[in-house]
Image: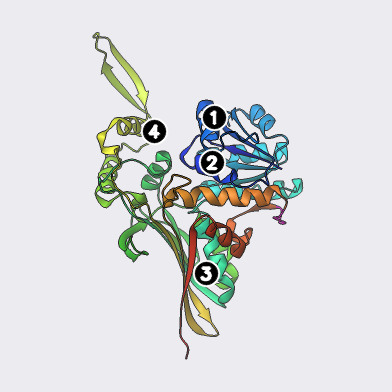
């Protein structure tokens, strides 16, 4: 079978490639990226001397070139910026291959679900949001949902240990982080989707040690787009996603928050006037967030310090069983992986798509159409696979016995 990894030069693409290299059940793996040299570097590091791997250049906005690249593939792992998810899905329909991605930040995910009938007609499967959050956080409720007669709420909390230097270095796509900081999060309450203020509803949550109690806040995420609908028959009334400062320390987060409040996270371009060293005056359009990214790249504030690199994704499901209250908490945790050379937080994003892509490519996911992870991934098999990569899942049950 053949798997194509788009965005293979990125932070997460490197981990996906490393995991794909672990087993011999994939005959051909193409690591593609706009940055061909970066894609080749990923191949050289993940699978040196492995003839199954090759690097390729690709611009996912070039429809014809993308379809040509995907032709003959059994599955495509899309780890490019979520802005291009729909483009890649449509190319998969034309090329005739299964699809999965790392998430669509709620609104894009909802648009992707509209392609369900198209994928069904073609006999193809697309799984949306299969990293950590979304991804693991979606499969966690699926692991325990059958234990409930009714489900009142699904609450997701994402936490990690932080950098001792309060670094502003981003743990995943800076563009996505800025979107999450500036766009209005959507929660599901009393049977309705409701928009809230960005970064609102701060709440202390007790994560697994060594994280401990940390402040979490709302942010726009894909889990809340699908979980309330997937478990509507259980009577879900509330669903939200909260994160502990996007993996930054609180000091670093507050600094970045202040910059975005000043407008430096904005996407809309502004006219900037400048005088060059020779005296020439120029004027150009610049997006504030692009300038912010370039400044941060050169800043000492992005130099990393010590970090244990521990991750905890905790989902708390509350409901009833036999008329009595029942609460089940599912924690998926990871320490850094020495062989992969990444933190626990990066590991839990990169491993799940590599695992499930193999199932898709082998034809082991029977449902055809477009699905979220909670309705398409076998939860027990999934978490057993993750455990083999040092990603462990524990279930804590709190119930009344009388």
| 1 or 4: tag closer to the N-terminus | 1
Residue at left 43%, top 52%?
Answer: 344
**Residue 365 painted magenta:** yes
Q: How crowded is mark 3: few (under 14 residues within 10 Å), some or many (20 or more)?
A: many
> Where 18 falls versus 231 (above or below)?
above
Residue drawn at (56%, 67%) of the image: 143
Taking 82 as reference, is 63 left or right?
right
Residue 390 sits inside the magenta stretch: no
Residue denoted by label 4? 268
**How far from the left and from the top, in percent, is residue 154?**
48, 66
Of the numbered discs 4 and 2, the one sitting upstream in the chain is: 2
In the image, which disc is placed on residue 236?
Answer: 3
Q: Where is residue 109 in the image (x, y as percent from the top left)?
A: 55, 49
The CA span between labels 2 and 1 is 16 Å
Mark 4 or 2, which is nearer the eye? Answer: 2
Span highlighted in magenta in the image: 364-368
Image vertical order of residue 117 relative to residue 190, above or below: above
Could you tell me which secondary element the residue under label 4 belongs to?
Answer: loop
* Quadrant in which the N terminus is drawn: top right
Query: Dots 4 and 3: beta carbons under 8 Å?
Result: no
Whichever of labels 3 and 2 marks the residue nearer the N terminus, that label is 2
């Amino acid at each position: 079978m053949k798997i194509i990894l788009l965005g293979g030069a990125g932070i997460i693409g490197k981990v996906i490639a490393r995991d794909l290299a672990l087993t011999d059940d994939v005959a051909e793996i193409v690591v593609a990226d706009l940055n061909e040299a970066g894609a080749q570097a990923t191949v050289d590091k993940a699978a040196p001397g492995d003839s199954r791997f090759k690097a390729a250049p690709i611009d996912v906005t070039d429809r014809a070139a993308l379809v040509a690249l995907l032709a003959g593939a059994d599955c495509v792992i899309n780890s490019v910026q979520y802005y291009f998810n729909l483009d890649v899905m449509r190319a998969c329909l034309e090329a005739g291959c299964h699809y999965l991605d790392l998430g669509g930040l709620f609104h894009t995910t909802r648009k992707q679900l509209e392609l369900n009938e198209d994928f069904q007609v073609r006999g193809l499967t697309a799984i949306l949001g299969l990293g950590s959050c979304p991804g693991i956080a979606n499969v966690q409720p699926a692991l325990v949902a059958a234990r409930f007669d009714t489900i009142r709420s699904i609450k997701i909390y994402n936490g990690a240990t932080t950098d001792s230097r309060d670094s502003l270095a981003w743990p995943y796509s800076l563009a996505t982080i800025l979107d999450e900081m500036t766009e209005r999060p959507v929660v599901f309450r009393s049977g309705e989707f409701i928009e809230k203020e960005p970064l609102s509803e701060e709440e202390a949550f007790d994560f697994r040690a060594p994280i401990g109690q940390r402040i979490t806040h709302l942010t726009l995420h894909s889990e809340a787009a699908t979980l309330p609908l997937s478990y509507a028959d259980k009577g879900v009334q509330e669903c939200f996603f909260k994160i502990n400062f996007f993996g930054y320390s609180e000091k670093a987060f507050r600094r970045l928050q202040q910059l975005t409040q000043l407008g430096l996270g904005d996407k809309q371009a502004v006219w900037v006037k400048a005088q060059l060293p020779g005296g020439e005056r120029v004027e150009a359009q610049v997006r504030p967030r692009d300038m912010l990214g370039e400044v941060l790249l050169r800043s000492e504030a992005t130099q990393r310090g010590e970090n244990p690199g521990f991750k905890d994704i905790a989902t708390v499901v509350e409901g009833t069983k036999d008329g009595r209250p029942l609460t089940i908490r599912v924690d998926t945790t990871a320490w850094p992986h020495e062989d992969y050379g990444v933190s626990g937080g990066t590991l839990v994003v990169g491993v799940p798509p590599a695992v499930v892509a193999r199932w898709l490519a082998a034809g082991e996911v029977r449902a055809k159409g477009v699905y979220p992870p909670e309705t398409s991934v076998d939860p027990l098999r999934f978490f057993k696979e993750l455990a083999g990569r040092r990603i462990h899942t524990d279930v804590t049950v709190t119930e009344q016995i009388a």
